[in-house]
Image (spheres, rainbow, N blue to C red):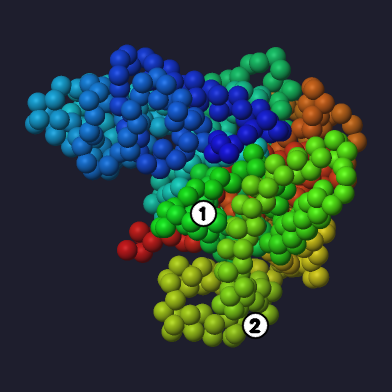
């Protein structure tokens, strides 16, 4: 199964965005004539794997390498570096050039910065006395479709840069990415923001509209009705909780990276000693699409039922005479066997973590903290973790959750009904199923924003970090605003071809898979007037978010 996700069923034409990114890259490489070696920064290489097949690049006679401190070993006379605008990488590239010169190698060098060139990087190249030897360009990759309804800005450090370093460069990047979306799908008429960074992105976006106005006659027919921008800082409780959806748990324990997990082949039933294998996880896998957002305890039951059904069909097919049509149906089911096997193996592996008493005790403690029922027990538990010298990231995760649940938490929790008793995870009627009883604060905010905007909940919003803003863009005074979750009463909530209008929900600082599952649940509700598309600086979990700050702690 291809790692590149299938985008055919996306509510927005994300395929056209990906194809444009492919064309941009191919054009860069075709314009450099002759045999060439493409040297890609490793993390960026992972991102590119979601856009273009490496086999396609090789068809153009391109050698592929990952950037490292080691010099580039190639017979090609042209070396093309594709790198993010990071100053430390300029030292490595300069070292490569100097090393080639010392060996008497004559090469042409190109650097294409992703998504744009920066003066500080070029200054380092000048200091290293190699700038004049290098042709410099840009590859404007501002957003990457991770799946049918998820766009990533690939900004791993955005939260830390804004919160700790005071560097708002990533906010310009987010605004530019949204601006690019608008140039394809029309100007978004309604904007709702919560948080300081979100307000800045909205302001930058307004400036971009002033500097580069879009005067399309179809401007009022934007496919995206509303943009909701939320800072991660507004809700730090949710990412610190253990995710309980299938995809969320896969990320917690196996770390999903660029839409796949890497694990020992033995876990997947392949007996190859010490060999690792990559397992793709996206909506191209029909079974994964069906179960990814379910609570994990339900996933186990679903897989069991499917396996039992297949076994019964097999027994029937071998003991009774069947029509050609019945045989055809059975063969169709057999085609899904590799997917079944894959997810049974993964679920079995996850169960080894989720059945541990330590995991269950941690879940209990998280719920105790969220319910704000007994701070003394929480203190003792955290002290015990420190005494046992548990990994620092585990301790910090619980400490952050504990500190976030103080202050105004009780008021917010009650007003937004964040704790839902007797949650039915098998047949959920509320987003709280993703955490078995806790409704993620961030998604409750989105739910209210979609239903009735910020105004009815202003007093609660004031208790959460950062300002909240609700604006209608200039030139859209007659444009339709939000419908309600009770149903779209007229055609205003649909775009020209009859599809539902869209809400773009952007998380600055990252979103978890559990929150994505909750948003999909909202979007699927009967009477929901909009499809939801998710934009994020990156996909996070409690560990990856906490680890972002480790460098700061020293």
Query: How packed is label 2: few (under 14 Cα within 10 Å), some, or many (20 or more)?
Result: few
Q: Left or right: where does residue 143 sit relative to residue 68?
A: right
Query: Vertical placement of 406 versus 173: above or below?
Result: below
Give the image quarter of residue 433.
bottom right
Q: Nearer the viewer, mark 2 or mark 1?
A: 1
| Secondary structure under the numbered disc 2 in the rendered image | loop
Q: Which residue is mark 1?
A: 270
Q: Identify the residue shown where x is 76% and y is 32%.
A: 501
Residue 194 in the image: x percent, y percent? Answer: 62, 49
Residue 415 in the image: x percent, y percent? Answer: 76, 64
Give the mark, 2 or 1, whose residue is nearer the N terminus: 1
Residue 491 in the image: x percent, y percent? Answer: 87, 29
Q: Identify the residue shown where x is 81% and y is 54%.
A: 315
Q: Which residue is mark 2?
A: 374
Give the image quarter of residue 4.
top right
Q: Identify the residue shown where x is 46% and y is 47%.
A: 156
Which quadrant would the C terminus be assigned to in this image? bottom left
Residue 303 in the image: x percent, y percent? Answer: 72, 57
């Amino acid at each position: 199964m291809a790692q590149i996700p299938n985008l055919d069923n996306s509510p927005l034409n994300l395929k056209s965005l990906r194809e444009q990114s492919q064309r941009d890259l191919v054009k860069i490489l075709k314009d450099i004539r002759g045999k060439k070696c493409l040297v890609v920064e490793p993390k960026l290489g992972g991102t590119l794997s979601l856009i273009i097949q490496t086999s396609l690049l090789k068809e153009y006679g391109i050698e592929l390498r990952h950037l490292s401190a080691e010099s580039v070993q190639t017979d090609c006379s042209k070396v093309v570096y594709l790198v993010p605008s990071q100053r430390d990488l300029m030292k490595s590239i300069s070292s490569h050039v100097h090393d080639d010169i010392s060996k008497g190698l004559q090469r042409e060098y190109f650097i294409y910065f992703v998504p744009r060139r920066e003066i500080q990087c070029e200054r380092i190249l000048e200091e290293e006395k190699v700038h004049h030897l290098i042709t410099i360009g840009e590859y404007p990759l501002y957003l990457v479709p991770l799946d049918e309804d998820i766009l990533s800005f690939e900004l791993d450090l955005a939260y830390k840069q804004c919160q700790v370093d005071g560097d708002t460069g990533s906010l310009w990047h987010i605004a530019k990415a949204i601006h690019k979306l608008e140039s394809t799908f029309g100007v978004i008429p309604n904007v709702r923001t919560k948080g300081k960074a979100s307000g800045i992105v909205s302001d930058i976006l307004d400036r971009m509209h002033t500097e580069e106005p879009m005067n399309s006659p179809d401007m009022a027919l934007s496919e995206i009705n509303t943009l909701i921008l939320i800072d991660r800082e507004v809700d730090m409780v949710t990412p610190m909780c253990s995710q309980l959806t299938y995809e969320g748990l896969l990320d917690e324990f196996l770390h999903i990276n660029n839409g796949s997990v890497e694990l020992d082949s033995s876990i997947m039933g392949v007996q190859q000693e010490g060999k690792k294998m990559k397992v793709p996880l996206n909506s191209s896998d029909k079974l994964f699409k069906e179960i990814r957002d379910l609570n994990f305890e339900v996933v186990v039951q679903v897989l069991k039922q499917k396996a039992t059904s297949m076994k019964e069909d097999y027994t029937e097919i071998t003991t009774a005479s069947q029509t050609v049509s019945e045989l055809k149906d059975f063969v169709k089911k057999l085609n899904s066997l590799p997917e079944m096997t894959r997810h049974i193996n993964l679920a079995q592996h996850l169960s080894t973590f989720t059945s541990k008493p330590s995991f269950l005790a941690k879940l209990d403690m998280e719920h105790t903290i969220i319910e704000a029922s007994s701070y003394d027990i929480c203190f003792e538990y955290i002290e015990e973790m420190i005494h046992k010298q548990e990994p620092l990231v585990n301790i910090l995760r619980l400490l952050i959750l504990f500190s976030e649940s103080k202050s105004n938490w009780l008021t917010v929790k009650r007003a937004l009904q964040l704790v839902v008793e007797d949650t039915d995870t098998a047949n959920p009627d509320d987003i709280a199923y993703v955490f078995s009883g806790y409704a993620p604060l961030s998604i409750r905010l989105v739910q209210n924003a979609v239903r009735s905007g910020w105004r009815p909940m202003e007093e609660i919003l004031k208790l959460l970090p950062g300002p909240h803003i609700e604006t209608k863009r200039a030139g859209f005074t007659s444009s339709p605003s939000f419908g309600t979750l009770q149903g779209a009463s007229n055609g205003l909530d649909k775009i020209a071809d009859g599809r539902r209008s869209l809400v773009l929900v952007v998380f600055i600082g990252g979103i978890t898979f559990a929150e994505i599952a909750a948003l999909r649940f909202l979007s699927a509700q009967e009477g929901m007037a909009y499809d939801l598309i998710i934009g994020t600086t990156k996909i996070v979990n409690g560990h990856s978010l906490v680890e972002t700050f480790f460098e700061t702690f020293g």
